[in-house]
Image (tube, grey):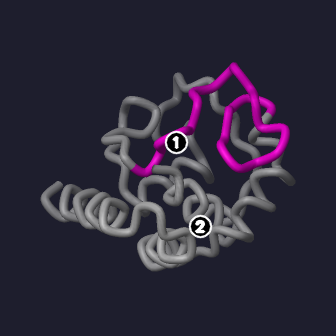
């Protein structure tokens, strides 16, 4: 738990230091997750995440079924049940029901590479 809190604090500190520096925010998110935020935005569109979620910066992503993902990187928990760390984000994106069997979020068949890229994009959302 201490390591996961350290990861959250590290990502949050990077976000604060890099706020307003577009490329720097993307680089920090890529470093934290190992993914590519630009590919992540494309994967978000491809998997239809915006049908359920409002996701800033993703055209047409104005869904009201799931939570609004504005400020995702600054949140303490994902789905209200797991600490918001890059590793947990990737796991949640791939198989949310494995983490919380009662979640309404479906399994979408997202592979590890796409989940990592999606997490990278979400970590640009401050």
Specify whether 83 is left or right of 22.
left
Residue under the image location 48 percent in, 76 percent down:
24
Q: Position of residue 89 (x, y in %)?
A: 48, 53
> Eyeballing the image, is 105 above or below 85?
above
Residue under the image location 26 percent in, 63 percent down:
13
- Using the image, tell me which numbered label, if any, was put on residue 116: 2
User: Which of pointers 1 and 2 indicates the residue nearer the eye?
Assistant: 2
Question: Which is nearer the N-term, disc 1 or disc 2?
Answer: 1
Specify whether 32 is left or right of 112.
left
Which quadrant holds residue 67? top right
Secondary element at tag 1: helix
Which quadrant holds residue 117? bottom right
Q: Position of residue 105 (x, y in %)?
A: 64, 31
Magenta stretch in the rendered image: 51-73
Label 1 – label 2 distance at C-alpha: 17 Å
Q: Residue furthest left?
A: 2
Residue under the image location 20 percent in, 56 percent down:
5
Closer to the camera in the image, 98 or 96: 96
Q: Position of residue 69 (x, y in %)?
A: 56, 38
Residue under the image location 63 percent in, 26 percent down:
66
> Eyeballing the image, is 64 above or below 92?
above
Mark 1 is surrounded, within 10 Å at the Cα level, by few (under 14), some (14 to 19) or many (20 or more) other residues, namely: few
Mark 2 is surrounded, within 10 Å at the Cα level, by few (under 14), some (14 to 19) or many (20 or more) other residues, namely: many
Q: Residue furthest front?
A: 20
Specify whether 37 is left or right of 110.
left
**Labelled pair 1, 2 in contact (Cβ < 8 Å):** no
Closer to the camera in the image, 24 or 109: 24
Please, what is the dominant secondary structure of the magenta stretch? loop
- Using the image, tell me which numbered label, if any, was put on residue 83: none
Give the residue pinned by disc 1: 98
């Amino acid at each position: 738990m201490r390591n996961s809190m350290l990861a959250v604090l590290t990502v949050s500190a990077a976000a604060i230091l890099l706020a307003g520096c577009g490329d720097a925010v993307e680089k920090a998110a890529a470093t934290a997750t190992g993914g590519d935020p630009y590919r992540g935005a494309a994967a978000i569109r491809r998997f239809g995440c915006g049908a359920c979620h409002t996701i800033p910066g993703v055209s047409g992503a104005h869904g009201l079924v799931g939570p609004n993902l504005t400020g995702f990187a600054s949140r303490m928990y994902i789905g209200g049940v797991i600490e918001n760390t890059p590793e947990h984000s990737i796991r949640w994106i791939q198989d949310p029901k494995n983490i919380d069997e009662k979640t309404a979020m479906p399994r979408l068949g997202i592979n590890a590479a796409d989940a990592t890229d999606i997490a990278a994009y979400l970590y640009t959302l401050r």
